[in-house]
Image (cartoon, coloured by chain):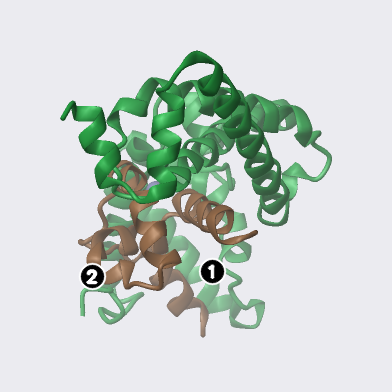
Amino acid sequence: MKPLEELVAALDAESAEWVAALTGPAAERAQREARLHGMLVRVALHELGRRRTTSPWLAGVELEDLAHQAAADAMLAILRKLGTFRGESRFTTWAYRFVILEVSAKLGRHYWRVHPPVALEAEAWERLPDRFGLDPAEHVQRAELVRAMGRAVDETLTAHQRRLFTAIVLEGTPLDALAVRLGTNRNAIYKTVFDARRKIRAYLVANGYLEQEGTGAR
Amino acid sequence: MNHRDRLGRFLATDPADVGCEEAMAVLHVYVDLIADGRDAAAAYPGVAAHLAACGPCGEDFEGLLAAVTSP
Ligand SMILES: [Zn+2]
Protein backbone atom coordinates (compact mmCIF):
# COMPACT_ATOMS: atom_id res chain seq x y z
CA MET A 1 0.00 0.00 0.00
CA LYS A 2 1.01 3.59 -0.52
CA PRO A 3 1.71 5.54 2.73
CA LEU A 4 -1.49 7.60 2.45
CA GLU A 5 -3.60 4.49 1.98
CA GLU A 6 -1.88 2.89 4.96
CA LEU A 7 -2.63 5.95 7.08
CA VAL A 8 -6.25 6.12 6.01
CA ALA A 9 -6.66 2.41 6.84
CA ALA A 10 -5.36 3.06 10.38
CA LEU A 11 -7.74 5.95 11.14
CA ASP A 12 -11.22 5.95 12.61
CA ALA A 13 -13.82 6.05 9.82
CA GLU A 14 -14.64 9.75 10.12
CA SER A 15 -11.01 10.89 10.21
CA ALA A 16 -10.20 8.61 7.25
CA GLU A 17 -13.01 10.21 5.31
CA TRP A 18 -11.64 13.69 6.04
CA VAL A 19 -8.11 12.82 4.95
CA ALA A 20 -9.31 11.02 1.82
CA ALA A 21 -11.56 13.92 0.79
CA LEU A 22 -8.93 16.61 1.47
CA THR A 23 -6.36 14.75 -0.60
CA GLY A 24 -8.83 13.52 -3.25
CA PRO A 25 -10.02 14.84 -6.63
CA ALA A 26 -10.21 18.64 -6.95
CA ALA A 27 -14.00 18.98 -6.87
CA GLU A 28 -14.40 16.80 -3.79
CA ARG A 29 -11.46 18.52 -2.15
CA ALA A 30 -12.90 22.01 -2.71
CA GLN A 31 -16.23 20.95 -1.27
CA ARG A 32 -14.59 19.44 1.81
CA GLU A 33 -12.35 22.49 2.31
CA ALA A 34 -15.41 24.73 2.28
CA ARG A 35 -17.09 22.53 4.87
CA LEU A 36 -13.99 22.52 7.08
CA HIS A 37 -13.70 26.30 6.75
CA GLY A 38 -17.27 26.72 7.93
CA MET A 39 -16.57 24.51 10.95
CA LEU A 40 -13.42 26.50 11.79
CA VAL A 41 -15.30 29.81 11.66
CA ARG A 42 -17.95 28.40 13.99
CA VAL A 43 -15.31 27.14 16.46
CA ALA A 44 -13.44 30.46 16.33
CA LEU A 45 -16.61 32.47 16.99
CA HIS A 46 -17.61 30.21 19.84
CA GLU A 47 -14.13 30.40 21.33
CA LEU A 48 -13.98 34.20 21.09
CA GLY A 49 -17.35 34.37 22.81
CA ARG A 50 -16.04 32.10 25.54
CA ARG A 51 -12.89 34.22 25.95
CA ARG A 52 -15.03 37.29 26.59
CA THR A 53 -15.86 35.85 29.97
CA THR A 54 -12.19 35.22 30.87
CA SER A 55 -10.64 38.30 29.15
CA PRO A 56 -12.65 41.34 30.24
CA TRP A 57 -10.72 43.60 27.86
CA LEU A 58 -12.52 41.87 24.94
CA ALA A 59 -15.86 43.41 25.94
CA GLY A 60 -15.98 46.07 23.21
CA VAL A 61 -14.02 44.20 20.54
CA GLU A 62 -15.71 43.24 17.25
CA LEU A 63 -15.16 39.50 17.13
CA GLU A 64 -16.57 38.51 13.73
CA ASP A 65 -13.53 39.71 11.81
CA LEU A 66 -11.08 38.10 14.21
CA ALA A 67 -12.94 34.79 13.88
CA HIS A 68 -12.72 34.84 10.10
CA GLN A 69 -9.02 35.73 10.16
CA ALA A 70 -8.30 32.95 12.66
CA ALA A 71 -10.25 30.43 10.59
CA ALA A 72 -8.51 31.43 7.35
CA ASP A 73 -5.04 31.17 8.90
CA ALA A 74 -5.89 27.89 10.59
CA MET A 75 -7.14 26.53 7.26
CA LEU A 76 -3.81 27.34 5.58
CA ALA A 77 -1.88 25.67 8.41
CA ILE A 78 -4.10 22.58 8.31
CA LEU A 79 -3.69 22.11 4.56
CA ARG A 80 0.04 22.70 4.82
CA LYS A 81 0.42 20.19 7.66
CA LEU A 82 -2.10 17.60 6.51
CA GLY A 83 0.77 15.24 5.71
CA THR A 84 1.86 15.28 9.36
CA PHE A 85 -1.51 14.10 10.70
CA ARG A 86 -0.92 10.59 12.02
CA GLY A 87 -4.25 9.88 13.62
CA GLU A 88 -3.17 10.27 17.28
CA SER A 89 -6.52 12.03 17.69
CA ARG A 90 -9.69 12.52 15.65
CA PHE A 91 -9.06 14.60 12.56
CA THR A 92 -11.47 17.31 13.72
CA THR A 93 -9.75 17.61 17.13
CA TRP A 94 -6.40 17.94 15.36
CA ALA A 95 -7.84 20.58 13.02
CA TYR A 96 -9.63 22.54 15.76
CA ARG A 97 -6.37 22.81 17.69
CA PHE A 98 -5.04 25.03 14.87
CA VAL A 99 -7.96 27.42 15.07
CA ILE A 100 -7.87 27.64 18.88
CA LEU A 101 -4.14 28.45 18.75
CA GLU A 102 -4.83 31.04 16.02
CA VAL A 103 -7.48 32.66 18.20
CA SER A 104 -4.92 33.02 21.00
CA ALA A 105 -2.28 34.43 18.65
CA LYS A 106 -4.76 36.91 17.14
CA LEU A 107 -5.85 38.07 20.60
CA GLY A 108 -2.20 38.52 21.61
CA ARG A 109 -1.76 40.94 18.71
CA HIS A 110 -5.15 42.58 19.08
CA TYR A 111 -4.51 43.35 22.75
CA TRP A 112 -2.18 46.23 21.83
CA ARG A 113 -4.86 47.94 19.73
CA VAL A 114 -7.01 48.15 22.83
CA HIS A 115 -4.13 48.86 25.24
CA PRO A 116 -1.47 51.00 23.54
CA PRO A 117 1.92 49.99 24.95
CA VAL A 118 3.21 52.07 27.82
CA ALA A 119 6.68 51.79 29.29
CA LEU A 120 6.87 48.72 31.49
CA GLU A 121 6.97 49.95 35.06
CA ALA A 122 9.53 48.52 37.40
CA GLU A 123 7.68 49.78 40.49
CA ALA A 124 4.16 48.44 40.56
CA TRP A 125 4.42 46.80 43.94
CA GLU A 126 1.46 48.63 45.40
CA ARG A 127 -0.73 46.44 43.14
CA LEU A 128 0.60 43.19 44.49
CA PRO A 129 -1.78 42.97 47.48
CA ASP A 130 -4.81 43.24 45.18
CA ARG A 131 -3.33 40.76 42.74
CA PHE A 132 -3.30 38.09 45.44
CA GLY A 133 -6.34 39.31 47.32
CA LEU A 134 -4.21 39.99 50.38
CA ASP A 135 -6.42 40.93 53.30
CA PRO A 136 -6.16 44.63 54.23
CA ALA A 137 -6.93 43.67 57.84
CA GLU A 138 -3.52 42.03 57.97
CA HIS A 139 -1.86 45.20 56.74
CA VAL A 140 1.31 44.96 58.80
CA GLN A 141 2.02 41.41 57.67
CA ARG A 142 0.94 42.36 54.21
CA ALA A 143 3.33 45.29 53.95
CA GLU A 144 6.11 43.08 55.26
CA LEU A 145 5.38 40.40 52.67
CA VAL A 146 5.22 42.94 49.86
CA ARG A 147 8.60 44.36 50.91
CA ALA A 148 10.08 40.86 51.01
CA MET A 149 8.74 40.16 47.53
CA GLY A 150 10.35 43.39 46.32
CA ARG A 151 13.67 42.34 47.81
CA ALA A 152 13.39 38.86 46.28
CA VAL A 153 12.75 40.39 42.87
CA ASP A 154 15.65 42.84 43.23
CA GLU A 155 18.15 40.40 44.66
CA THR A 156 17.42 37.11 42.93
CA LEU A 157 16.07 37.87 39.45
CA THR A 158 17.97 38.84 36.32
CA ALA A 159 16.91 42.07 34.60
CA HIS A 160 15.03 40.06 31.99
CA GLN A 161 13.22 37.93 34.58
CA ARG A 162 12.33 41.07 36.54
CA ARG A 163 10.90 42.77 33.47
CA LEU A 164 8.71 39.81 32.48
CA PHE A 165 7.59 39.02 36.02
CA THR A 166 6.56 42.65 36.51
CA ALA A 167 4.67 42.82 33.21
CA ILE A 168 2.78 39.55 33.71
CA VAL A 169 2.19 39.41 37.44
CA LEU A 170 1.94 43.03 38.49
CA GLU A 171 0.70 44.73 35.34
CA GLY A 172 -1.47 41.82 34.27
CA THR A 173 -0.29 41.83 30.65
CA PRO A 174 -1.55 38.67 28.91
CA LEU A 175 1.33 36.32 28.17
CA ASP A 176 0.56 36.07 24.44
CA ALA A 177 0.38 39.87 24.14
CA LEU A 178 3.75 40.21 25.84
CA ALA A 179 5.19 37.60 23.46
CA VAL A 180 4.02 39.69 20.49
CA ARG A 181 5.49 42.86 21.96
CA LEU A 182 8.87 41.27 22.68
CA GLY A 183 9.01 39.28 19.44
CA THR A 184 9.24 35.95 21.23
CA ASN A 185 6.86 33.08 21.98
CA ARG A 186 4.63 31.93 24.82
CA ASN A 187 6.96 29.10 25.80
CA ALA A 188 10.02 31.35 26.23
CA ILE A 189 8.09 33.80 28.42
CA TYR A 190 6.51 31.04 30.49
CA LYS A 191 9.93 29.48 31.17
CA THR A 192 11.38 32.83 32.23
CA VAL A 193 8.49 33.55 34.61
CA PHE A 194 8.60 29.93 35.85
CA ASP A 195 12.25 30.40 36.88
CA ALA A 196 11.39 33.76 38.45
CA ARG A 197 8.56 32.22 40.51
CA ARG A 198 10.88 29.43 41.67
CA LYS A 199 13.59 31.88 42.74
CA ILE A 200 11.23 34.27 44.55
CA ARG A 201 9.60 31.40 46.38
CA ALA A 202 12.98 29.99 47.45
CA TYR A 203 13.94 33.44 48.79
CA LEU A 204 10.69 33.83 50.74
CA VAL A 205 11.04 30.33 52.20
CA ALA A 206 14.71 30.85 53.11
CA ASN A 207 13.82 34.10 54.89
CA GLY A 208 10.86 32.68 56.77
CA TYR A 209 8.03 34.43 54.90
CA LEU A 210 6.63 31.25 53.38
CA GLU A 211 6.61 27.69 54.62
CA GLN A 212 8.25 24.88 52.73
CA GLU A 213 5.00 22.92 52.38
CA GLY A 214 2.74 23.06 49.36
CA THR A 215 5.52 22.96 46.80
CA GLY A 216 3.60 20.54 44.62
CA ALA A 217 6.53 18.15 44.83
CA ARG A 218 5.09 16.28 47.81
CA MET B 1 -6.96 30.43 52.54
CA ASN B 2 -4.79 33.25 53.91
CA HIS B 3 -2.62 35.55 51.83
CA ARG B 4 0.56 33.56 52.36
CA ASP B 5 -1.06 30.37 51.10
CA ARG B 6 -2.36 32.15 48.04
CA LEU B 7 0.99 33.70 47.26
CA GLY B 8 2.83 30.45 48.02
CA ARG B 9 0.57 28.56 45.69
CA PHE B 10 1.11 31.05 42.89
CA LEU B 11 4.88 30.93 43.31
CA ALA B 12 5.04 27.13 43.56
CA THR B 13 6.49 25.47 40.47
CA ASP B 14 6.06 21.82 39.54
CA PRO B 15 9.27 20.18 38.27
CA ALA B 16 7.11 17.89 36.09
CA ASP B 17 5.71 20.91 34.15
CA VAL B 18 6.65 20.40 30.47
CA GLY B 19 6.17 24.01 29.34
CA CYS B 20 3.91 25.51 26.67
CA GLU B 21 5.52 24.10 23.56
CA GLU B 22 5.32 20.44 24.57
CA ALA B 23 1.85 20.82 26.04
CA MET B 24 0.45 22.49 22.93
CA ALA B 25 2.08 19.88 20.66
CA VAL B 26 -0.07 17.10 22.17
CA LEU B 27 -3.12 19.15 23.12
CA HIS B 28 -5.35 17.40 20.55
CA VAL B 29 -4.35 13.97 21.86
CA TYR B 30 -4.86 15.06 25.46
CA VAL B 31 -8.29 16.54 24.73
CA ASP B 32 -9.45 13.45 22.83
CA LEU B 33 -8.50 11.23 25.77
CA ILE B 34 -10.67 13.37 28.05
CA ALA B 35 -13.51 13.49 25.53
CA ASP B 36 -13.37 9.68 25.48
CA GLY B 37 -13.58 9.56 29.28
CA ARG B 38 -10.00 8.38 29.72
CA ASP B 39 -7.40 9.55 32.25
CA ALA B 40 -5.38 12.04 30.22
CA ALA B 41 -3.52 13.34 33.28
CA ALA B 42 -2.19 9.84 34.03
CA ALA B 43 -1.06 9.43 30.43
CA TYR B 44 0.53 12.91 30.32
CA PRO B 45 1.31 14.06 33.89
CA GLY B 46 3.72 16.76 32.71
CA VAL B 47 1.03 18.22 30.45
CA ALA B 48 -1.53 18.11 33.27
CA ALA B 49 0.94 19.97 35.52
CA HIS B 50 1.46 22.58 32.83
CA LEU B 51 -2.22 23.14 32.08
CA ALA B 52 -2.88 23.65 35.80
CA ALA B 53 -0.15 26.31 36.06
CA CYS B 54 -0.19 28.15 32.72
CA GLY B 55 -3.14 30.51 32.16
CA PRO B 56 -2.97 30.80 28.36
CA CYS B 57 -2.40 27.07 27.73
CA GLY B 58 -5.20 26.32 30.19
CA GLU B 59 -7.45 28.59 28.09
CA ASP B 60 -6.51 26.81 24.87
CA PHE B 61 -7.20 23.50 26.56
CA GLU B 62 -10.65 24.63 27.77
CA GLY B 63 -11.40 26.02 24.32
CA LEU B 64 -10.44 22.87 22.43
CA LEU B 65 -12.32 20.67 24.88
CA ALA B 66 -15.40 22.88 24.46
CA ALA B 67 -15.06 22.71 20.66
CA VAL B 68 -15.02 18.91 20.56
CA THR B 69 -17.61 18.27 23.26
CA SER B 70 -20.20 20.97 22.48
CA PRO B 71 -22.72 20.01 19.79
ZN1 LIG C 1 1.72 27.30 28.66
Q: x, y (%) of residue A191?
A: 30, 44
Chain containing mark 2: A
Q: Earlier in the sequence, mark 2 or mark 1?
A: 1
Q: Residues within 10 Å of mark 1 (few under 14, many from 20)?
A: some
Foreground pick, A64 / A178: A64
Q: Which residue is mark 1?
A: A143
Q: Residues within 10 Å of mark 2 (few under 14, many from 20)?
A: few
Residue that protrudes farthest toward the right in the picture: A60
* Chain A: colour as depicted: green
Left or right, B48 with respect to A108, comes to left
Determine which quarter of the picture holds residue A19: top left
Q: Is residue A160 above or below residue A218?
A: above
Residue in the picture at 56% in, 61% down: B69
Q: Mark 1, chain letter? A: A
Identify the amino acid type marked 1. Ala
A137 left or right of A121? right
Chain drawn in brown: B
